[in-house]
């Protein structure tokens, strides 16, 4: 039996206070996550942070790796806990061993969280960056053909988002992985707009590295994310910054400079993480699993289709064509700029956002949104 949507929305108080259509920036915090955060803070306030903190923190981190592994569709030892998507993209970009003449391929739709690590690594290692220029309304074959022109035997890394934060386009990351692997390179994927929005299955994917956040489509707190590292790529991805959690058995090192990392992706974790955030993220994922991840993804697809149909019915709206979609819908409105439209709708407590280059209005539809949310959006746009 599917969850009752009214009951689901009651577990997300923020969606009661507004027409919440901007999960792609920040998802609403669930009661499950907030309760765990408050409880952990209270425990630390009243009992201190000494007795048992290390052991319980390790257990909580291990459980959370397992939770993220189920979101990503991989084994828990292929997951490193991070602070956010950008953290994971930096780990994947900086950990490779670059050679003179190496290149990184990216594209014009990338978020700075994935793009800037590429630019910084290129500056440090004297790499060439090829930026594939993408246009809205392109089909998958056209997108793929553009990447085929850029990827070559000198390509060490292909860095792309699974879902464009600008247009909402779902990129064919498995086909892109095949392309770059054919030339001997690797692929790192920014999953900021996919993790928690669409079903992921790293076990069947050809992707090497995949980074997701907790605070968007998973409705968790800031400061927590996860990086998937294909177990076959551990030897290709060096540790770039390390700390006590980066050691095997919590202390495998000596004064000669020898230190041993854990067998899995945990080696890319560095220092202490804010325990209330760990607890909140873990409880939040458990709540989503109680709802049923299949239901979450199917409901997100259903309400996104409803959103696209509603917007298509407005004569002044020009939707960005996306052959497949996750939870983002981008568009323009005749006669008004995206930023002005967003500001005007915010006056009616309809929360969306604009994105730059190209200038678009962006709506995020997630499992908790109901048809009334979308109808209010449609009415608001018609009244501009």
Image (cartoon, rainbow, N blue to C red):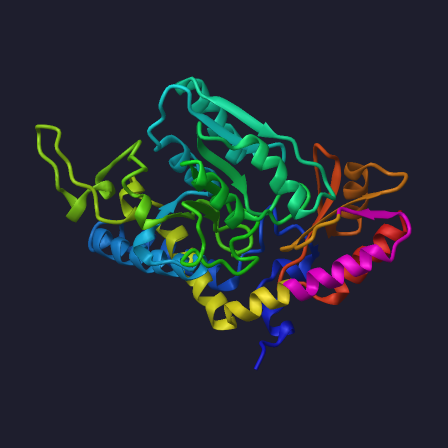
Q: Residue 304 lies in magenta, yes or no?
A: yes
Q: Is residue 126 magenta?
A: no
- Which quarter of the rendered picture does the N terminus lie within? bottom right
Query: What residue lies at 43% left-to-right and 41% top-to-bottom?
Result: 181
Horizontal and vertical percent position of residue 339 = 77, 37
Q: Quadrant of residue 11?
A: bottom right
- Vertical arrangement, residue 365 with respect to residue 142, above or below: below
Residue 301 lies, in percent from the top left, at 65, 63
Q: Which is more toward the observer, 50 or 33?
A: 33
Residue at the spot 49% in from the left edge and 54% down from the top edge: 220
Q: Is residue 368 visible?
A: no
Instruction: Tell me the quarter of the picture where residue 373 sits.
Output: bottom right
> Where are the magenta residues, as a range?
301-320
Which residue corresponds to the image point at 32% horizontal and 44% vertical from the top-left? 233
The foreground one among 35 and 201 is 201
Above or below, 310 against 362 in this view is below
The prevailing secondary structure element of the residues shown in magenta is helix
The percent position of residue 221, horizontal first and vertical second, equals 48, 51
């Amino acid at each position: 039996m599917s969850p009752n949507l009214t009951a689901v929305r009651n577990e997300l108080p923020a969606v009661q206070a507004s027409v919440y259509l901007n999960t792609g920036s920040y998802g609403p915090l669930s009661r499950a996550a907030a309760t765990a955060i408050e409880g952990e803070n209270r425990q630390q306030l009243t009992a201190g942070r000494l007795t048992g903190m290390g052991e319980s923190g390790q257990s909580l981190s291990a459980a959370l790796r397992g939770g993220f592994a189920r979101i990503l569709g991989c084994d828990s030892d292929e997951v490193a806990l991070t602070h956010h998507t950008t953290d994971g993209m930096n780990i994947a970009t900086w950990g490779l061993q670059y050679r003179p003449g190496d290149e990184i391929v990216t594209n014009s739709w990338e978020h700075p969280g994935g793009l800037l690590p590429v630019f910084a690594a290129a500056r440090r290692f004297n790499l060439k960056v090829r930026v594939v220029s993408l246009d809205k309304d392109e089909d998958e074959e056209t997108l793929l053909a553009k990447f085929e022109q850029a990827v070559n035997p000198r390509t060490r890394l292909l860095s792309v988002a699974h879902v464009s934060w600008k247009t909402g386009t779902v990129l064919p990351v498995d086909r892109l992985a095949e392309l770059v692997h054919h030339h001997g390179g690797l692929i790192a994927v920014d999953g900021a707009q996919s993790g928690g929005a669409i079903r992921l299955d790293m076990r069947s994917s050809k992707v090497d590295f995949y980074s997701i956040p907790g605070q968007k489509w998973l409705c968790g707190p800031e400061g927590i994310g996860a990086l998937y590292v294909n177990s076959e790529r551990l030897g290709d991805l060096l540790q770039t910054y390390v700390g006590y959690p980066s050691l095997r058995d919590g202390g495998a090192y000596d004064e000669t400079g020898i230190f041993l990392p854990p067998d899995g992706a945990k080696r890319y974790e560095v220092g202490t993480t804010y325990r209330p955030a760990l607890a909140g993220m873990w409880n939040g994922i458990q709540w989503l699993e109680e709802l049923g991840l299949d239901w979450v993804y199917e409901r997100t697809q259903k309400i996104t289709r409803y959103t696209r149909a509603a917007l298509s019915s407005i004569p002044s709206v020009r939707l960005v064509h996306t052959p497949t979609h996750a939870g983002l819908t981008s568009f323009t409105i005749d006669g008004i700029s995206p930023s002005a439209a967003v500001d005007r709708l915010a006056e009616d407590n309809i929360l969306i956002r604009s994105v730059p280059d190209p200038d678009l209005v962006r709506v995020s539809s997630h499992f908790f949104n109901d048809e009334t949310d979308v109808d209010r959006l449609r009415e608001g746009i018609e009244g501009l």
